[in-house]
């Protein structure tokens, strides 16, 4: 981690995303006290916690490995927090009942972890962290070991629980779709640094960096040249064609990268010659709710286009000639990165 | 681009290997190899002692008519188990904190201590015995500081200190391994939930380490029960089973049939009691629950403080250095003295008593090497049978049976083996010695190889077979390279154990001609005609030579890596 | 003649039946995804074809030949297990050369072929590295190269992208299919991620508890799921419980909760039958509820949750009768169309509705989501 500066609001559901090894787990481990930072301060509430041991930081932590105590059943696992702090039974009882109900774990309380399904284990781990009574919840890939389908359902339950209980959550994940669907704000990390922070919509619609543009959802990237400004828009040239964008750039060497997400590319059979890029459909994949096309344009650029099923998407076939429009409201422009485009957006 | 495949241009060698590989896919060949290794175990390892004792059980009759001898025998047997129990318990309490220190501490010292713990392992127990005797019980040792002739004279207490010091490293090694395998995340999870470090260890870590704790308890127990050579040196008037047997074998004036009766009586009781006790503890101990129902947050917070931890570490290190390490290394002093004063000269020439010393060394090393080779050849397939569960549901039973030879006191095993193999008059005494040493060390190799093979994920071998590799190819190219280290340490374990074995050797070798070095050393210590420096040097040479061999072996394998 | 065929294959482990009477045909050059939840038997299926485990009953044919008793080393199938099982003590190129060498290639031949494989998977520059030095994506490519080096034409992939980050998964799945098609391989790709299956497969086989629930091209499985489980597993689906109130020659009327009536095109229903209606999330139309309207299948409700998913926005709507539905709307149509609490109308066109009999053990259990 390099010089991380971050503020998390009370009752916020914050997600931290980034490729493996970007430092996101290190970050929450520092907050928890599991790892000590070499430099800098960490405050929880307004208390400086740098020298406070883990057990005194009052946080709930859900581990990537789940880490349920194998020798204890579900009930004893969940109640470990209150038990170990010496709380009286009545103090914790209400909270325990409430959470067991919310997570539908009532009929599993006597089971040991190895008798539970993956989803039940995950829920138990979350319940255990919640019942410890902390106001701050740190989650390290809490849904990581589950099937895709189960993850998509559980993530909403997780968010609802956190909000209902009025907690603050910092949820680390490598799955940007997961983060987008439940986070109030998202932190994008890469190679130990924070690249960008914003709401899901901000990161998706106007990412401030090329890396974010590529990481948070699919995007088309074109290399082009800066031409000039026209009214409120910036004009660039990509492969001989003019494109417009609202993003203000003025790169020294005149090279730019234009970005547009596949679902914002308009694809028609024909269109006004000035604005369109003509091309041929070379690939077509059915995605369920939408269809993804790969179109090779006349200036030899491959563009991915996504059309929802509600449109006439299904009528386009491989080999069809089409006209593409890259609307200026959705086209983003960035200065060409020093390290080269491939390195700048690389996820590995 | 190197390859693990044979790069020899020797075409016929490769053809042979290829032919063997192909044979290995045939089910019949596979069954033959596994069956013969299982047969070897039963025919050579497990059944001979059992049959040896059972066939001669009628001899027990005689001693029952000798009340004095009987009483002495019974007392010795009880003392065996009594001592073993105390040792295992106290060693566990003392060694566990050191294992903890080694794994969890972040100071450089931990690393050094880790290496130092291995030292008593490398010293054969007979040598440890003499060293302990000098350290605690002779004027030149620690007694001088206290101004007495002998701080701890021969007897119960000295035996206790001896057994304590050589079971200690065993427990540390096992627990260090367990702690390294233990996922610390459980403890951290407990602390994130608000548990004080001590509470987390008590309620989470210790219960999860139970299997390792039970295993080390049993190992220490078995070791104390079985050790003969060193114990005889320091026992004085005290007797446990092995010491008693040792003395009976040497007893002059005892009629042969009575001697035989005593041996059979004590050996059979030792064998059967230790086996039953061992399995009883293995089955019942896991049910024992650590007290984790109550917490004491404020007390445990104070006990987790760094001051307390430093005190605990200091105490543990003190015990380790004073009670375990120093007595083990003490022999170095008189040994160096013996090197300087000319004794070395006569030793190397072989004059006087040194002739029989070198003879015993030759026998010991021959037996050691042969036992190792035999155990590797027959032990590898057995390890595969266990690791890959070739016997299906019966595999745990086989695994349990394999552990029997190291549970049983080796001198008792020796007695029973002599009875069994002694029937075959054509068998030279050397062979009986070899069989006995092989029996006693078989388990070490098989268990360590099986554990290493089990840790190779099954998928790797499965993938290799889909890539076209025959079973023998997989074994050669995948399994062996990945378990190389364990095979080496298993072999070393067998070799050093065979080298250091006293009890069984004593029971088997009746004539002085076939004395192995440990037996010789035990006799020399007692012998008035052998002077101090000769004793010290003999022990010293014994240690140094095995050191050198081990070092050489270690360097050889390192270069190949 | 199909390249791979399983006929009534059963495989048990103790008293758990992993594969139950399964029959499946795979044609030369096909890319098949076996899709199912954890524990549905997908890995066992691959192991049966690879020969690592033997079936308890039934026959397995590869290229017309009965292979039940043929050991794995003689089947020439490229098997890539879930966590790759790379040989940790061998370098990258030695890993790849292992197959050819085991099959009797000469050393020169084996290493030549291995370099070719490494070039194809763009790993040639790491030929002398060791597996633990490679990133996740590179390890996966290595496992692939190793499997294909000896020229196998059948590729078995067990959750090949499971160990990778979500974003990497999306990038690499196209490449996997590309390599398979370019080398004319017949591929069986096992996964629990239905989005992945939809994108890469020629044909999807949905597996549950060792039995095939449905198989067919992705669009067919998606649009015409034969069971509630398949409908739920292969994409986002809404389920509404009800009873059949009336049946006529063009369709039926379904009585939902609290008096709502739903029109469906299904004529094969019986009055009084308890049923479940399924509609895909992207087929749920949401309209602003300003004006009251009279129309079939138009239900009033309120938006309870809005979730931004990137290229889609998901709205959870609680209908006035208590039922809950989710609607997925492309982001292009606007990000803030409906706010939480807003009154809306939900339109469910009959042609987008599918009717299923109510499952005996209850709907919740059938959906099998923990």
Image (cartoon, coloured by chain):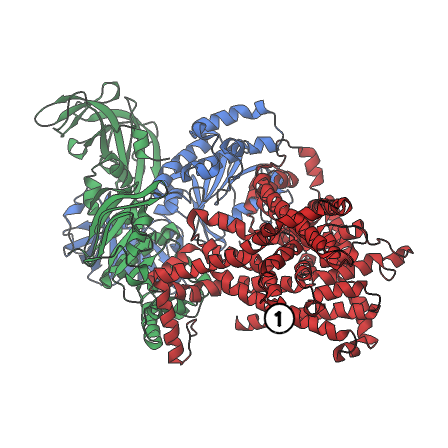
Q: Nearer the viewer, residue C75 or B492?
A: B492
In the rendered image, which quarter is residue C355 located in?
A: top left
Front position in the image: B112 or B435? B435
What colour denotes chain A?
Answer: blue
Left or right: A101, with B324 as reference point? left
- Residue ranking furthest to the left: C249
Q: Colour of chain B?
A: red
Q: What shade does chain C have?
A: green
Q: Is residue C29 visible?
A: yes
Q: Residue B532: horizontal and vertical position, in percent?
A: 83, 68
- Considering depth in this image, is A20 or C126 the residue closer to the camera? C126
Give the residue displayed 34% in from the left and 77% down from the top: C108
Res. A341 in view: no
B50, above or below C257, in the image = below
User: On screen, A266 above or below C29?
Assistant: above
Q: Return the residue nearer the eye: C150 or C259.
A: C150
Q: Residue A51's spot in the image, x, y percent?
A: 65, 45
Is A281 placed left or right of B561 in the picture? left
The residue labelled by disc 1 is B366
Q: Quadrant of the N terminus of chain B?
A: bottom left
Callout 1 environment at 10 Å: few (<14), some (14 to 19), or many (20+)? some
Place of residue B557 in the rendered image (x, y in percent of width and height, measured from the top left): 56, 70
- Residue at 26% x, 18% y is C258
**Rendered view: A143 above or below B329:** above
- Numbered disc 1: secondary structure: helix
């Amino acid at each position: 981690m390099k010089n991380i500066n971050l503020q998390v609001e009370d009752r916020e559901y914050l997600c931290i995303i980034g490729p493996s090894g970007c430092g996101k787990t290190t970050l929450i481990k520092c907050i928890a006290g599991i790892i000590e930072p070499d430099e800098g301060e960490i405050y929880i509430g307004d208390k400086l916690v740098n020298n406070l041991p883990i057990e005194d930081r009052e946080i709930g932590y859900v581990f990537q490995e789940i880490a349920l105590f194998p020798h204890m059943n579900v009930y004893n696992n969940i109640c470990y927090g209150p038990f170990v702090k010496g709380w009286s039974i009545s103090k914790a009882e209400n909270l325990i009942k409430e959470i067991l109900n919310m997570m539908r774990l009532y009929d599993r309380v006597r089971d040991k972890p190895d008798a539970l399904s993956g989803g039940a284990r995950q829920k138990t781990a979350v319940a255990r962290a919640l019942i410890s009574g902390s106001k701050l919840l740190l989650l390290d890939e809490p849904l990581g070991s589950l099937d895709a389908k189960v993850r998509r359902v559980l993530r909403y339950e997780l968010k609802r629980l956190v909000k209902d209980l009025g907690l603050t959550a910092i949820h680390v994940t490598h799955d940007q779709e997961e983060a987008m669907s439940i986070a109030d704000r998202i932190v994008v990390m890469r190679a130990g640094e924070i690249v960008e922070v914003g709401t899901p919509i901000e990161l998706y619609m106007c990412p401030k960096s090329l890396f974010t543009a590529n990481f948070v959802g699919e995007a088309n990237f074109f290399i082009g040249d800066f031409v000039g400004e026209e009214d409120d828009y910036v004009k660039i040239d990509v492969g001989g064609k003019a494109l417009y964008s609202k993003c203000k750039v003025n790169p020294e060497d005149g090279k730019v990268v234009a970005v547009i997400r596949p679902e914002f590319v308009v694809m028609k059979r024909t269109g006004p010659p000035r604005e369109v890029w003509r091309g041929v459909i070379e690939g077509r994949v059915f995605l369920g709710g939408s269809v993804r096309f790969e179109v090779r344009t006349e200036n030899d650029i491959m563009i991915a286009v996504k059309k929802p099923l509600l449109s006439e998407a299904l009528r386009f076939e491989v080999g069809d000639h089409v006209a593409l429009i890259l609307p200026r409201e959705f086209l983003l422009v960035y200065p060409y990165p020093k390290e080269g485009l491939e390195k700048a957006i690389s996820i590995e | 681009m190197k390859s693990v495949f044979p790069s020899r241009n020797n075409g016929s060698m490769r053809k042979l290997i290829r032919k063997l590989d192909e044979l290995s896919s045939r089910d019949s060949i596979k069954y033959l190899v596994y069956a013969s290794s299982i047969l070897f175990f039963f025919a050579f390892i497990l059944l001979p002692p059992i049959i040896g004792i059972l066939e001669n059980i009628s001899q027990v009759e005689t001693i029952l008519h000798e009340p004095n001898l009987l009483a002495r025998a019974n007392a010795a047997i009880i003392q065996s188990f009594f001592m073993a129990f105390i040792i295992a318990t106290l060693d566990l309490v003392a060694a566990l904190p050191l294992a903890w220190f080694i794994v969890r501490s972040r100071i450089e010292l931990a690393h050094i201590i880790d290496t130092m713990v291995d030292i008593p392992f490398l010293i054969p127990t007979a040598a440890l015995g003499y060293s302990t005797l000098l350290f605690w019980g002779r004027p030149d040792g620690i007694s001088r500081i206290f101004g007495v002739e002998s701080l701890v004279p021969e007897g119960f207490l000295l035996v206790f200190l001896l057994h304590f010091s050589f079971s200690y490293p065993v427990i540390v090694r096992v627990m260090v391994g367990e702690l390294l395998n233990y996922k610390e995340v459980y403890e951290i999870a407990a602390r994130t939930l608000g548990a004080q470090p001590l509470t987390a260890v008590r309620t989470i870590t210790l219960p999860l380490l139970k299997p390792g704790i039970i295993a080390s308890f049993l190992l220490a127990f078995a070791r104390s029960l079985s050790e003969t050579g060193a114990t005889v040196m320091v026992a004085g008037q005290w007797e446990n089973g092995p010491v008693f047997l040792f003395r009976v074998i040497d007893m002059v004036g005892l009629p042969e049939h009575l001697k035989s009766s005593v041996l059979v009586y004590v050996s059979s009781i030792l064998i059967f009691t230790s086996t039953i006790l061992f399995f009883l503890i293995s089955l019942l101990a896991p049910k024992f629950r650590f007290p984790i129902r109550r917490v004491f947050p404020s007390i445990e917070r104070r006990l987790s403080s760094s001051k307390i931890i430093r005190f605990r570490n200091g105490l543990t290190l003190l015990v380790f250095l004073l009670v375990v390490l120093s007595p083990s290394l003490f022999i170095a002093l008189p040994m160096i003295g013996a090197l300087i004063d000319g004794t070395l000269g006569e030793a190397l020439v072989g004059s006087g008593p040194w002739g029989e010393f070198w003879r015993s060394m030759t026998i010991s090393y021959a037996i050691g090497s042969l036992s190792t080779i035999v155990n590797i050849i027959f032990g590898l397939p057995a390890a595969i049978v266990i690791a890959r569960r070739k016997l299906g549901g019966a595999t745990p039973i086989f695994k349990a049976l394999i552990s029997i030879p190291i549970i049983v006191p080796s001198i008792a095993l020796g007695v029973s083996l002599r009875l069994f193999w002694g029937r075959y008059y054509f068998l030279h005494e050397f062979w009986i010695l070899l069989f006995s040493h092989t029996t006693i060390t078989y388990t070490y190799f098989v268990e360590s190889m099986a554990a290493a093979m089990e840790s190779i994920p099954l998928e790797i071998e499965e993938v290799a077979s889909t890539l076209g590799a025959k079973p023998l190819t997989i074994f050669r190219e995948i399994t062996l390279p990945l378990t190389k280290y364990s095979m080496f340490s298993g072999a070393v374990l067998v070799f050093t154990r065979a080298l250091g074995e006293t009890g069984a050797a004593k029971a088997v070798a009746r004539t002085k001609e076939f004395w192995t070095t440990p037996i010789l050393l035990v006799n020399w210590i007692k012998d008035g005609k052998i002077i101090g420096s000769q004793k010290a040097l003999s022990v010293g040479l014994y240690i140094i030579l095995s050191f050198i061999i081990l070092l050489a072996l270690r360097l050889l394998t390192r270069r190949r890596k | 003649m199909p390249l791979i065929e399983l006929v009534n294959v059963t495989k048990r482990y103790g008293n758990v039946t992993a594969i139950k009477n399964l029959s499946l045909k795979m044609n030369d050059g096909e890319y098949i995804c076996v899709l199912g939840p954890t524990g549905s038997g997908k890995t066992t299926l691959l192991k049966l074809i690879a020969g690592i485990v033997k079936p308890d009953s039934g026959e397995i044919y590869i290229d017309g030949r009965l292979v039940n008793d043929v050991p794995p080393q003689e089947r020439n199938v490229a098997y890539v297990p879930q966590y790759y099982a790379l040989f940790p003590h061998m370098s990258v190129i030695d890993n790849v050369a292992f197959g050819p060498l085991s099959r009797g290639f000469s050393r020169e031949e084996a290493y030549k072929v291995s370099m070719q494989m490494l070039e194809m998977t763009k790993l040639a520059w790491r030929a002398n590295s060791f597996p633990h030095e490679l990133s996740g994506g590179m390890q996966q490519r290595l496992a692939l190269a190793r499997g294909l080096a000896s020229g196998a034409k059948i590729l078995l992939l067990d959750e090949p992208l499971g160990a990778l980050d979500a974003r990497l998964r999306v990038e690499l799945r196209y490449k996997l299919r590309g390599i398979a098609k370019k080398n004319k391989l017949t591929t069986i790709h096992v996964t629990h991620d239905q989005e992945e299956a939809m994108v890469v497969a020629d044909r999807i086989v949905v597996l549950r508890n060792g039995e095939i629930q449905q198989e067919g091209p992705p669009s067919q499985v998606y649009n015409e799921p034969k069971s509630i489980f398949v409908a739920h597993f292969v994409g986002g689906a809404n389920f509404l419980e009800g009873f059949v109130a009336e049946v006529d020659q063009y369709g039926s009327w379904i009585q939902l909760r609290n008096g709502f009536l739903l029109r469906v095109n299904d004529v094969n229903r019986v009055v009084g039958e308890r049923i479940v209606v399924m509609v895909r999330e992207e087929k749920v139309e949401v309209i602003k509820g300003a004006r009251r309207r009279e129309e079939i299948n138009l239900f009033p409700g309120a938006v309870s949750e809005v979730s931004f998913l990137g290229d889609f926005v998901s709205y959870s709507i609680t209908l006035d009768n208590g039922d809950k539905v989710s609607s997925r709307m492309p982001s292009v149509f606007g990000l803030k169309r409906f706010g939480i609490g807003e009154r809306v109308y939900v339109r469910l066109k009959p042609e987008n509705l599918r009717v299923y009999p109510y499952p005996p053990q209850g709907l919740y259990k059938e959906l099998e989501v923990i």
